[in-house]
Image (tube, helix red, strand yellow):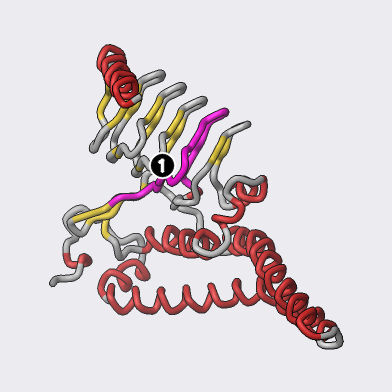
Amino acid sequence: MKPFAKDQSKNPPPTNWLDRLLRRFSRAAYGVAVLLMYTLASTALGLALAPAIWLWTRVHAWSLHLPGILSWIVAGFALALGFFVFGLVLLVVVPVYNWVLPTRVKPFKGGYYTLAALPWFLHNGLFYLVRFTFLPFVTLTPFGIWFLKAMGMKIGRHAFINTEYISDPQLITVGDDAALGGSVRIFAHYGGGGNFAIAPVTIGNRATLGLGCCVMGDVVVGDDATILPQSVLLPGSRVGAGETWGGVPARRIERQEMDHIKAEIRGLSETTG
């Protein structure tokens, strides 16, 4: 299989010598970037683990003087508490890394292996440290909202976010009183055929995204719009204010059709009852 980097048909010209070098040695550059990301992630995780380890060693040393099973119970409690200390500290460490490092993601269309994709790679690599470890434990809490905002996600007042399946938070805007249902997937990128695009996502005020729906890059959902559960909004979708969309791929559902669907659902419910 030929590497994606060979297809440069939709790739903008290199911006400098480093971009040219990265494109020429794309696979090697990608390998180096992954190893550097692992190293960087290790330092972030290590900083977050340090206070948790300190807490556990202190409590464990004290618990050794307790009688019988009580010492194990206290040590187990300290270990569990250490996990939450680790997670809460990680919620602070990762945004600091994201702020200090070159993670300013900008819209882009081109190849996978380009200099413009590096901030995106770094931004998501840091974000995933929390998404795949501790974010599920704070998704419905103020800590989760704070973390998403600290990572650059724009979230309006009283927005309800019941999902951790987010990528590219820096390019996502969620309006006031918007509701994102459980397991909703939002990512501000898409790709295929050797080409890659980074494009923002905007969710309007009071918009509702149903359970498990998928919103891809370059999508705008208008105010008061509704996306039905399990629907997929493809790149370029523009959902108008107050509209209802559903399906795979999602399309606009007119009021008459929606009323007919609701009537069928009620009819089934009455029959089943």
Residue drawn at x 31%, y 79% as measured from the top left: 28
Q: Secondary structure at mark 1?
A: loop
Left or right: 69 in relation to 222: right
The one nearer the camera, 264 or 239, is: 264
Q: Residue furthest top?
A: 256
Query: How far across and down, in percent of the image, does residue 205 sit?
Result: 51, 26
Using the rendered image of the protein, determine whether residue 152 is visible from the camera's viewpoint: yes
| Quarter of the figure with residue 4 | bottom left
Q: Nearer the viewer, residue 17 or 212?
A: 212
* Residue 173 located within the stretch drawn in magenta: yes
Picture quarter with the N terminus: bottom left
As drawn, the residue found furthest toward the front would be 273
Residue 256: x %, y % from top left: 27, 12
Image vertical order of residue 209 relative to residue 130, above or below: above
Name the amino acid, label 1.
Pro
Q: Residue at x 74, y 73 (%)?
A: 78
Q: Quadrant of the C terminus?
A: top left
Q: How many discs appear?
A: 1
180 displayed left or right of 52 = left
Q: Which residue is mark 1?
A: 200
Specify the segment rendered in magenta.
170-190
Q: Say which of 12 and 105 sits in front.
A: 105
Label 1 CA crowd tier, 10 Å (few <14, some 14–19, many 20+):
many
Q: Is residue 131 magenta?
A: no
Q: Position of residue 185 (x, y in %)?
A: 40, 46
Residue 164 percent coordinates (x, y) = 50, 51
Q: Is residue 12 visible?
A: no
The residue depicted at 27 percent of the width and 20 percent of the height is 264
